[in-house]
């Protein structure tokens, strides 16, 4: 059996990749993908602990998160489309009109 | 059987509802708000009469309706709204609601028939005025009384300034508001003093402040006094502070100057203010907390002296006035002076008696004056009138009844009440020089009152018409004659509720109904009876000519003789076809009287010379109080100007801030929680 530390390290690594993507990329589609990575990093944690303690709650929760992620992508794609329509680009730095 | 006590709040709320209806219904209402007001005050009157009957059957009570604040910690004070229904307050309820209803009906003739504009505002004001006064009457504690007292003041401001498009009324309204507010300032300090001293402001019961004050003077209880002051001295100071409000509202010297100017308001409003509501509030307050005032001989003597002085002082000014309502205004001040004289000299019942009779005959006189003013097309100068007797018979006869009552002629209502006041002042004053002085001034005011009253009657109704208006007066309708007739009858017969002199002279028991009524003969609240007050008051009774009956007769003969003397003088001088302005013969004195002893000028002078104080207060307010508030707001303005820069609109920055924030939180928790 793989000890849970390995899963945690994997999850933390995927999360950091997602975070890095969000902080550095300018393309909104990368944003979506990075957010997806961060969500799944959290799901790995849930599944790992569920496996560790022999409790199915975490896995059930993982299924919910997958459904949620699908919905999130649908909304996210819609936002990206609107972004493109309004600013002619999917660069998030262009869409900076809502500020002080 | 439903008990009447459950409906006591409705007495106050009905006129309040009429106020709300008139306020929002505007011009769509039947008769532009008048019917609503009449219905509401008639409802209040019926309920008041019902409560009167139930109190007659022994159902006086005190009830707390709503507690809106309680003390925290060791202090156990509470601030409440409640009703105190005892013989005194229920009598006042009936008077106020009756006069208010008649004033509403009269307004149909005075305002609606004359096509005044903006009438819903007028009826809204009348409704709120009546509601405030009724709320003040049922108040069971001093703070509630104070709040309604202020509301009454506000309503008087609104109503006196009703014709705000003309120059006079707004300025008169402002003056009434400011002058009474000056007195109320002391009243407020007095309320706070009562709270700190006794921890309660209730009027009735074993835990009420008059009862605690009595116990403290007997050494049975301890109360807080500032700086270890003598208890009796402190009670005198507190009593005088509250008296400040009374002097302002009841228009006693030196705060009487607002009342004659308040004549700028519509005449029915004058009737309401001077007969039943605002001015009566002051005297009623002293009667309400009489158990506290009788404990302090100094305060009592001051009340009596101020009252006696005001009675004479105001009466002299009434002699020279040209305008009908001005004469009535000074007579009001003078009559309230009598009531204060009675209260100060231990004549609690006499004061309430005069308050009752005066409410009726003065409302009658004001409404009668209103009728004359309608007839004269709003000319108030008595020198333009004359000969109205035959053209306005109902007005004339009722006005005559009111005038005979005001002058104190036997057997009209005013005779009995004024005679009893003077009698009380006399028997209690023989040992007390201040009370005796007040009595003498009160007695001197009697012929003056009779003189100016009948000068007014003769100039208005007798002789030849002195202008084209008086030759062809505008007729008045039922809605003017009806209220006048009701009050005219009351002005004749109200004296019958308290025929003390008859009882004493003829030795018939039990016809002094008002004495029995206020003495809790038919039930009342413990500690609020005239008997109890008589035990507490500092006076002893002395009789002249060796007995009670000769004293009664001598006192009555003196006041009646003087009144008839004044009347006779007025008759000789003014009951002729074409009277001269005899007051011109007074020369400089007339000028002095006509200008009210230059009291107004004096007050303006005082105000001008204390501007530096007001300026200092203004500087403090603008600089320190407003400065703190403005400082707080400018600090947040400046800092928000800087901090809002972080809202850049770039979504990556927000993500970065979120991440940094989370990291910082984790590090902080880690450090505190000892994870590292």
Image (spheres, coloured by chain):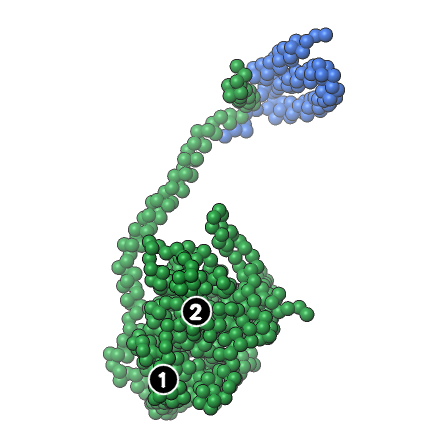
Chain colours: A blue, B green
Residue B179, quarter of picture: bottom left
Q: Chain of mark 1?
A: B
Residue labelled with disc 1: B543
State how far apart marks 1 and 2 are (Cα). Answer: 25 Å
Residue B601 numbered tag: none
| Pointer 1 or 2: first along the chain | 2
Q: Position of residue B642 (x, y in %)?
A: 44, 29
The disc numbered 2 marks a residue on which chain?
B
Q: Residue at (30%, 52%) from the top-left corner?
A: B615
| Residue B112 appears in view | no
Q: Residue at x 49, y 26 (%)?
A: B646
Quadrant location, the N terminus of chain A: top right
Element class at badge 2:
helix
Local secondary structure at mark 1: loop
Identify the residue under disc 2. B290
- Assess disc 2: are there few (<14), some (14-19) or many (≥20) residues with their C-alpha within 10 Å of its C-alpha: many
Q: Residue at x 33, y 48 (%)?
A: B620
Pinpoint residue B513: horizontal percent, then vertical percent. 51, 81
Residue B668 is left or right of residue B169, and the answer is: right
Judge depth for marks 1 and 2 and give the one in front: 1
Q: Is residue B151 left or right of residue B594?
A: right
Splitting the image into 4 quarters, where does residue A57 fall?
A: top right
Q: Residue furthest front?
A: B220
The reply to whether discs 1 and 2 touch (Cβ–Cβ < 8 Å) is no
Q: Is residue B3 visible?
A: yes
**Picture layout, residue B474 above or below residue B616:** below
């Amino acid at each position: 059996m793989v000890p849970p530390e390995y899963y945690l390290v994997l999850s933390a690594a995927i999360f950091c990749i997602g975070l890095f993507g969000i902080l550095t990329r300018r393309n909104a589609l990368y944003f979506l993908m990075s957010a997806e990575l961060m969500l799944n990093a959290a799901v790995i944690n849930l599944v790992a602990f569920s496996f560790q303690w022999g409790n199915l709650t975490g896995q059930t929760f993982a299924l919910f998160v997958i459904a949620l992620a699908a919905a999130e992508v649908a909304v996210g794609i819609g936002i990206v489309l609107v972004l493109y329509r309004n600013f002619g680009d999917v660069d998030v730095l262009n869409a900076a009109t809502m500020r002080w | 059987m439903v008990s009447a006590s459950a409906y006591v709040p409705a007495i106050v709320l009905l006129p309040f509802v009429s106020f709300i209806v008139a306020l929002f219904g505007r011009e769509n209402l039947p008769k532009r708000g008048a019917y609503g007001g009449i219905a509401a005050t008639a409802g209040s009157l019926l309920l008041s009469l019902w409560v009167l009957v139930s109190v007659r059957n022994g159902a006086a009570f005190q009830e707390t309706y709503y507690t809106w604040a309680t003390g925290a910690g060791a202090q156990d004070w509470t601030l409440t709204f409640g009703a105190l229904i005892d013989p005194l307050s229920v009598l006042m309820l009936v008077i106020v609601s009756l006069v208010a209803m008649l004033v509403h009906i009269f307004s149909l003739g005075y305002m609606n028939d004359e096509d005044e504009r903006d009438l819903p505002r007028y009826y809204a004001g009348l409704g709120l005025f009546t509601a405030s006064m009724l709320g003040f009457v049922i108040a069971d504690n001093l703070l509630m009384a104070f709040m309604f007292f202020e509301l009454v003041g506000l309503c008087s401001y609104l109503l006196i300034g009703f014709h705000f498009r003309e120059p006079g009324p707004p300025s008169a309204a402002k003056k009434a508001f400011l002058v009474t507010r000056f007195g109320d300032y002391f009243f407020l300090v007095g309320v706070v003093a009562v709270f700190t001293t006794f921890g309660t402001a209730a009027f009735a019961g074993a835990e009420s402040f008059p009862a605690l004050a009595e116990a403290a003077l007997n050494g049975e209880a301890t109360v807080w006094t500032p700086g270890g002051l003598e208890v009796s001295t402190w009670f005198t100071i507190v009593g005088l502070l509250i008296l400040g409000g009374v002097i302002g509202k009841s228009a006693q010297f030196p705060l009487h100057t607002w009342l004659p100017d308040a004549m700028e308001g519509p005449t029915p409003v004058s009737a309401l203010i001077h007969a039943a509501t605002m001015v009566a509030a002051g005297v009623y307050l002293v009667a309400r907390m009489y158990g506290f005032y009788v404990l302090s001989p100094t305060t009592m003597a001051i009340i009596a002296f101020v009252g006696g002085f005001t009675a004479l002082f105001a009466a002299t000014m009434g002699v020279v006035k040209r305008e009908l309502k001005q004469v009535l205004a000074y007579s009001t001040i003078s009559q309230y002076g009598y009531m204060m004289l009675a209260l100060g000299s231990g004549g609690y019942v006499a004061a309430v008696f005069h308050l009752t009779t005066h409410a009726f005959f003065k409302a009658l006189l004001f409404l009668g004056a209103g009728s004359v003013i309608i007839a004269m097309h709003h000319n108030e100068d008595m020198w333009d009138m004359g000969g109205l007797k035959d053209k306005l018979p109902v007005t004339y006869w009722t006005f005559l009844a009111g005038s005979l009552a005001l002058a104190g002629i036997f057997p009209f209502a005013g005779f009995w009440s004024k005679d009893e006041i003077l009698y009380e002042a006399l028997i209690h004053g023989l040992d007390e020089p201040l009370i005796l002085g007040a009595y003498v001034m009160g007695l001197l005011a009697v012929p003056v009152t009779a003189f100016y009253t009948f000068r007014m009657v003769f100039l208005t109704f007798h002789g030849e018409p002195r202008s084209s208006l008086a030759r062809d007066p505008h007729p008045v309708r039922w809605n003017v004659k009806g209220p006048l007739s009701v009050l005219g009858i009351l002005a004749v017969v109200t004296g019958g509720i308290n025929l003390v002199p008859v009882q004493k002279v003829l030795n018939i028991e039990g016809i002094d109904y008002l004495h029995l009524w206020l003495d809790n003969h038919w039930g009342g609240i413990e500690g609020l009876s005239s008997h109890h007050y008589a035990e507490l008051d500092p006076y002893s009774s002395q009789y002249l000519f060796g007995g009670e009956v000769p004293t009664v007769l001598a006192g009555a003969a003196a006041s009646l003789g003087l009144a008839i003397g004044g009347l006779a003088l007025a008759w000789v001088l003014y009951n002729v076809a074409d009277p001269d302005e005899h007051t011109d013969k007074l020369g400089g004195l007339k000028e002095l009287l006509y200008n009210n002893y230059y009291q107004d000028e004096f007050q303006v002078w005082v105000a001008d010379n204390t501007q530096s104080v007001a300026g200092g207060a203004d500087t403090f307010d603008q600089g320190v109080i407003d400065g703190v508030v403005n400082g707080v707001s400018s600090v947040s303005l400046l800092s928000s100007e800087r901090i809002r820069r972080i809202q850049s609109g770039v979504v990556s920055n927000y993500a970065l801030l979120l991440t940094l924030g989370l990291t910082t939180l984790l590090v902080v928790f880690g450090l505190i929680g000892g994870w590292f």
